[in-house]
Amino acid sequence: MRYQTVIGNDIDVAISYLEGDALVGLPTETVYGLAANAFSEKAVASVFAVKQRPANNPLIVHVDRIAEVKQLVQEMPEMAEALLEHFAPGPITVLLKKNALLPPNVTAGRFEVAIRIPSHPQTLELLRRIDFPLVMPSANLHTTISPTHPQHVLKNFYGAIPYILDGGPCEVGLESTIVGFDPDGVPVIYRQGAITEEEIRLVTGAVRVKGMPAGVTLPGSAPLHYAPRTRTFLVSASTAVETAVPHRTGVLSFKNYHPGIPQANQFILSNRGDLREAARNLYRGLHHLDEQNFDLIIAEECPPQGLGRIINERLRRAAHPEPLRIA
Ligand code: TXA
Ligand code: MG
């Protein structure tokens, strides 16, 4: 099915498409999502198809309140509830044992389901008005840069979806943190994200950090994820990039322009050196530089504290695995 994709502000229009099993781009505080009715096996299947996502990579379910999380799972561990009470609505995703309400393709056949309560006001309002949960992977094609503006969603899915709800630029700009629970009840971070390990520890005491459970294709298990089409290299903050590059080069830098490279070719994440602002601008900067058709993009690491570590992890996955050779 081909559509004339519309970007608009009408929650009711978005709802009517979702009720008809169509896919809609929706804003969240983290990144834009590609939404579908999570109770419809057919709508869920079309998310995998449209996103070109491998069938073994499960989707996050989105609801508007904790009581609804409980309806979809066998039990709510104490620590999961504590995390939701503290951070939801917001960028925390909990991984819990599912019951039979959700169709198996939501979780790619796995017995655990990832669920979150997004805080973007329009999407929260939409979720309150519908009587089904939504699956929402990030609204980008598999392995490409995540979307933080409606235009990014349009770039990926023009013609493939009927509607994108315009919620402006995403406030946070990094995906949610995914937390599961070991049999001893201790929370386990499976994907680092907008809520840092330190913030989680303040609520739960102990926390472990692991990769995704075996068998799940996670962001970054493929060599490239969040990746621009332009070859991108990650360099440390102290690298003098102007001596490195004879090419038309785009630069993504944390705070300062690099001398010797036209400022028009550079994207500054936060000129006041604020990591929250840098996170908010990260994917927009990558999209912007990628659209300029440079010969290469050089991305500079952020200070490795708090969100800076998460930004650097995303950049590492966006970048070419080989270091840039400086002549
Ligand atoms: O911030 C976010 O979480 C955004 C917004 C749109 O809500 N969504 C998002 O979805 O990042 P996606 O599909 O791009 O990434 C979800 C990640 C994938 O790595 C997937 O493997 C993992 O979550 N995941 C989802 N369900 C899972 C499950 N049942 N078990 C293990 N991992 C799961
Ligand atoms: Mg994604």
Image (tube, grey):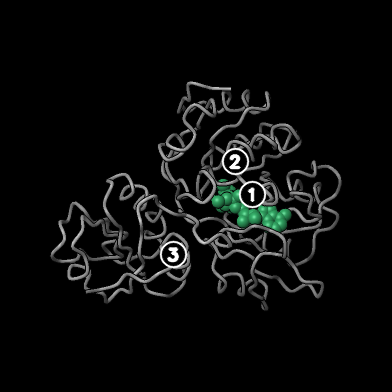
Residue 24 point in image, percent of width and height:
57, 32
> Horizontally, is 159 left or right of 303 in the view?
right
Secondary structure category for the residue under label 3: helix
Instruction: Tell me whether the residue at label 2 lies in contact with that at label 1, contact meaning CB atoms closer than 8 angstroms.
Output: yes
Residue at the image point whose x is 44% and y is 54% from the top:
227
- Percent x, y of residue 225: 50, 56
Q: Which residue is mark 1?
A: 117
Q: Residues within 10 Å of mark 3 (few under 14, many from 20)?
A: many
The amino acid on which the numbered mark 1 sits, given as a three-letter code, is: Ile
Quadrant where the C terminus lies? bottom left
Label of residue 124 in the image: 2
Q: Amino acid at mark 3?
A: Ile
Q: Position of residue 137 (x, y in %)?
A: 60, 46
Residue at the spot x=64%, y=48% of the render? 54
**Residue 142 visible to the viewer:** yes
Q: For this view, does 285 lie left or right of residue 153?
A: left
Identify the secondary structure beneath mark 2: helix
Q: What residue does disc 3 label? A: 311
**Residue 89 in sight:** no
How many angstroms separate mark 2 from mark 1 (CA)?
Answer: 8 Å
Mark 1 burial class by Cα count in 10 Å: few <14, some 14-19, many 20+: many
The 10 Å Cα crowd at callout 2, few under 14, some 14 to 19, many 20 or more, is some
Viewer-nearest of discs 1 and 3: 3
